[in-house]
Image (spheres, rainbow, N blue to C red):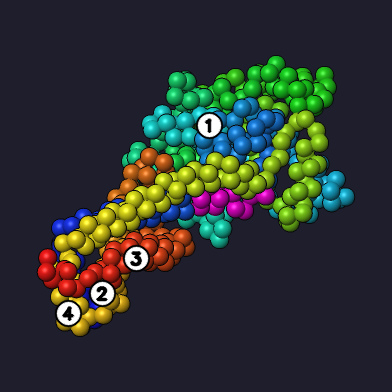
Amino acid sequence: MNLLVIAFKSLKQRALSSSLTALSVALGIMLVVSVLVVNSVVDNTFNQRSVGVSLLIGPRGSDLGNVLSAVYRIGKPAENMPWRVLTEDLPRAANKLSRTDDPSRIIEWAIPMTMGDVTQEGSFPVLGTTPKYFKMEYASGKKFRMKGELPVNSFDAVIGSQVARENGWDIGSQFSLIHGGADGHVHDEKFTVVGMLAPTGTANDRTVFVNIEGFFLISGHEKPPEEAIQRLQDFGYKVTAEQEAVIREAAGGHDDHGHEGHGHGDHAGHDHGSHAPHPIPDDLKEVSFILVRTKSPTASIMLAAELNEGMRAQAVNPIIVISRLMKLFVGNTRKLLLFLTALIVVVAGIGIFVSIYNSMSDRKREIAIMRALGASRVTVFTIILGESLLLCLGGGLLGLVMGHGLVVVAAPFIESQAGIMVNPWSFDVMELVLFPVLIGMATLVGFLPGLTAYRTDVADSLND
């Protein structure tokens, strides 16, 4: 008879004790697998969103704060930048590097973003941008899939999958924005949903995208002339008397734009107003961030250095910033969690040792009979090691299934609370290490009890 079969039958005789011992191993492995899967999800989440973006241009201050706000929609921008950063500074820097008057030799595309408001229903972050945003890759090799249309008209909006699910919105739904956050003023303007994004597993799922022109047309979003002029001067721009007069005149002509723009007058298929909203002049506009894709990595480094020479804005590579965050915080947290779960597995291994070792005194007669029937010392030793191996590997397989099962149960909660899509059956390479480790632990755990069985005196045990 196969020695592993004998070991299995021996474990069946102590079914309750063996089951509890294997369960302790399974619980330990379950926690290890859960930590590995969740860590893999977090790692992908914090890295995939920056793919395709060479530079993030934002206000001077914390580069990490800018990346968290712009890429992950965590927090708000410290301040906004004048629109001239997009229309003047960025092209000027690119032209200087290329020594031409064609910024497209350096820059593939530049996408402006405005932030600060939230939806009245659900308090989801609102991001004003252009249709180009939905043509970029949100992850490596992954592009947005959308039901409906792009937000080409002023009061068009596209919503993420989580927003659609939690608010129950669909194509044609209308909503209002809250100025500056949950405690701010509710704007009168209504936006209409024209597109819905398929799930991406990124912050885009819990974001509402509006046409950036419509964002500017909202009453209160344009800068008062005094503030606009001061902001331009703070960023180092010269404002001539003629330009100042133009700004004041333009601001005066847009005091009532919010009333004229309430009805989506330029939205095809929607007759909400008889007047098209007046455009906002550039000097009254602000931009929170600019996403830039350069033609080459070298161009990205040189462009960032050129932009950072002045005091107007700050250009950073999002991937570098997030990698630093992962290394300093997430990486250490992962190590701590893996260390704690490894301790649990070690405790489970000690439990197996105690269980088998304590059973040896009750099994001396059984071992002696086996020896009397012709089993060698090595055979008895191997059977005990086999029992330890079966308990460890059986518990390990059960723990592997339980670990992924735990993530299956937790995945909907994680998605609803954090907006992160979790694939519970994703496999981490580190899981391959578990079973060699379990085999090694089984060998160590079973060695001493096996040695005890090896040294069992047949005559004394039969007499007892």
- Disc 3 from disc 4: Cα separation: 22 Å
Picture layout, residue 66 above or below residue 298:
above
Q: Which residues are magenta?
A: 43-54
Q: What secondary structure is found at the residue carrying circle 3?
A: helix
List the residue tagged with mark 4.
372
List the residue tagged with mark 3.
447
Residue 227 figure quarter: top right
First-in-chain label (3 vs 4)? 4
Q: Amino acid at mark 1?
A: Gly
Q: Amino acid at mark 4?
A: Ala
Decide: few, some or many residues near mark 1? Use Cα within 10 Å; few <14, some 14-19, many ≥20.
Answer: some
Q: Amino acid at mark 2?
A: Val
Tag in front: 2 or 4: 4
Where is residue 129? Give x, y as percent.
Answer: 58, 40
List the residue tagged with mark 1.
75
Where is residue 31? Give x, y as percent.
Answer: 35, 51
List the residue tagged with mark 2.
380
Contact check, label 2 and label 4, Cβ < 8 Å: no
Where is residue 299? Give x, y as percent.
Answer: 77, 52
First-in-chain label (1 vs 2)? 1
Residue 288 figure quarter: top right
Name the residue nearer the viewer: 382 or 223: 382
Residue drawn at x 51%, y 29% is 117
Q: Answer whether residue 46 is magenta in the image.
A: yes
Residue drawn at x 82%, y 19% is 241
Tag in front: 1 or 2: 2
